Image (spheres, coloured by chain):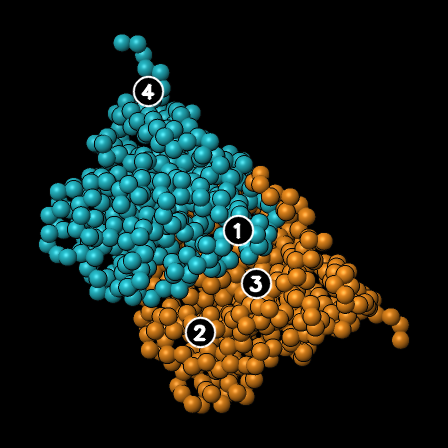
Chain colours: A orange, B cyan
Amino acid sequence: MKKGSAVYDNIRLMLPGPTPVPPSVLQAQALPMINHRGKEFSQLLSEAVEGVKWVYQTKGDVLLLTSSGTGGLESAIVNVLSPGDPVLALVTGEFGERFAKIAETFGASVDRLKSETGKAIETDEVKKQLTQKKYKALLITHNETSTAVMNPIEEIAKAAKERGILVLVDGITSVGVVDLPVDEWGLDIVVSGSQKGFMMPPGLAFVSVSPDAWKAHQEAKMPRFYWDYSRFLLFADKGQTPWTPAISTVYALHRAVELLREEGLENIFARHELLTKMVRAGVRAMGLKLLVEEDRIASRAVTAVFPPDGISPHQLRAKVQEKFGIVLAGGQGGLKDSIFRIGHIGNYRPADILIALAALEVVLREMGYEAHGGVEAAQNLMSPVPA
Amino acid sequence: MKKGSAVYDNIRLMLPGPTPVPPSVLQAQALPMINHRGKEFSQLLSEAVEGVKWVYQTKGDVLLLTSSGTGGLESAIVNVLSPGDPVLALVTGEFGERFAKIAETFGASVDRLKSETGKAIETDEVKKQLTQKKYKALLITHNETSTAVMNPIEEIAKAAKERGILVLVDGITSVGVVDLPVDEWGLDIVVSGSQKGFMMPPGLAFVSVSPDAWKAHQEAKMPRFYWDYSRFLLFADKGQTPWTPAISTVYALHRAVELLREEGLENIFARHELLTKMVRAGVRAMGLKLLVEEDRIASRAVTAVFPPDGISPHQLRAKVQEKFGIVLAGGQGGLKDSIFRIGHIGNYRPADILIALAALEVVLREMGYEAHGGVEAAQNLMSPVPA
């Protein structure tokens, strides 16, 4: 890694994935290969998957796929649906649209219920739509990363499950970030990816599979081989996967769940909530506008911000990276030229947010906008000033 | 990685994948995450893919998938075929059968041409079969890992291409092991995986795509999203992948192709041929029988051996691992209880073969079989005794 290697030594990723990976998780990947059909790997994988189940708050099955999160979404569709099945897709942005598109690609008959940009899906709208047709499955993105919106998944899932509709969840940027008790809320398949709340490099996807999902799987006729959950289940009992897994990434997972267990789920959720509040208070104090105005539906993984009038989000991000090594995310799709996004999912601490806000202030002022008070507003959330 | 960690410090994998990864490749994975949409990653990925193209000996497109090799096989099928397409699958063992099964799963009409166990497919048989029907594609496993057979791919591909039939190749254990000039031999899609000749951890698959394959892709109607080559091509031009790739594994790839380039393709092929000859001469000298008797069709990645009468291959492998930390592979499918396999694909040197043969001699003698002369026979191939 000779060329351009300086970038690795002065970088502060603040993306909604990939996110910074703790040193001991990175280092775990450097262990030698072992036999993926041997008993040592079985033990390692079983322990790692137990950790994932703990994060998912499920006693059901969790399968480990060697793929990115999008592969996990595809696996959810093809394992429980048949061509022609009526599906309701809740679309809050780019990732909701992707989930819908995958279902269409494999022949599902997809109706879309869309929210306004920056708004969440309303449960009442969903309830109304569910009376229109006998849907087989509901697709929902818990945290829509492109708009930084969190959907009210508990209520929506309840409405669907009451009607016997499968609930398939894109939890890629919510699992291990915000409370998502899979069994308690009756979620049938929840997909997540390694490079998000799990604080790992990308390369693995996880899927939880409920008893109802297994039942649907038996009847589902969409073609599948690499993603076939039956094959995964067969090997899961032996602490294996049907195809050679990304062994180094499993080492990383094993270490990452140790770290997550040390911190504890409640602390992890509270930390992400604090970081979210700090970012929102900080940019608001600078006078910037948030894409998601309502705190209630704000993603705990990423925050979408409009730059001040006349300042390009692309230039702003470039300057922040140049001056501070901080990598912010751009907008996606129709929001490409209008917003920037601050990621705070995974291994972030309050210090990271304070640095990001401080950097934003410096760069905005350089660009002619008098940004002040952001750092202070965020500090105050950590140790509120006496009344 | 507290529990069972001793295994990492005294292990000599001799599997046909995963294979031992050079230390600098393992360590490359421990670098921090960078933005997979940033210019540094673009450069890194482009350089790494250039290296893969060099190994493939192609000027055409090579795409990088985050998946195991089986995902690569699935991608080859769904990107160039439509349901109902007539396909001829050449089946030499478990992996040939897997390729055929994937095609069937997605609706192809598959005829199988099988070889006897331990034999290669005969080109004349293929030619005869090709006159029976207008096939759309031919599926061929270059090195069939389950039986340690290498198929005569050059002649077979020529026969198919002359008839305008697409040639889809499982090159998972042959790319970077044995000469496979993709462009020169007119191979339309060649699939390989990272944990084989590339001397890397598992987690990435590579596919080369010929102009004829791209043409077929335009018409192909099998459903695809995660594997869709069009999406990959679109992002490849930007030095990106459509979905977040396994970044750490791309770091490993970048380093691995540096090592491969240092050694040079001809030396790599010659080394694998020498290792194969050493193993075969060694076990023959001990009086053991090879599953593949003909040297011409012997895989350069793995060698399949029958233990002496009355000795269980399972017990033999267990004792070799216990005493020497050497992990040999078992048989697969119908060969499960009758053979063991010695892997020599990737980062192996003559010393590794001598150790394996020496270990086999010790353990076989312990088990009551007078094994001698294996090490010496292999040594002699390195420095032949004067005539």
* Closer to viewer: mark 3 or mark 2: 2
For residue A100, the mark is 2
Q: Secondary structure at mark 1?
A: helix
Q: Is residue A33 left or right of residue B378?
A: right
* Closer to viewer: mark 1 or mark 2: 1
Q: Position of residue B93 (x, y in %)?
A: 25, 46
Give the letter of the chain under mark 4.
B
Q: CA distance from mark 4 to mark 3?
A: 55 Å
Q: Can you see residue A143? A: no
Q: Residue A304 occupies which quadrant of the picture?
A: bottom right
For residue A54, the mark is 3
Quadrant of the rendering where the N terminus of chain A is positioned: top right
Q: Position of residue A380 (x, y in %)?
A: 82, 68
For residue B381, the mark is 4
* Closer to viewer: mark 3 or mark 1: 1
**Which amino acid, mark 1?**
Ser
Between disc 4 and disc 1, whose residue precedes? Answer: 1
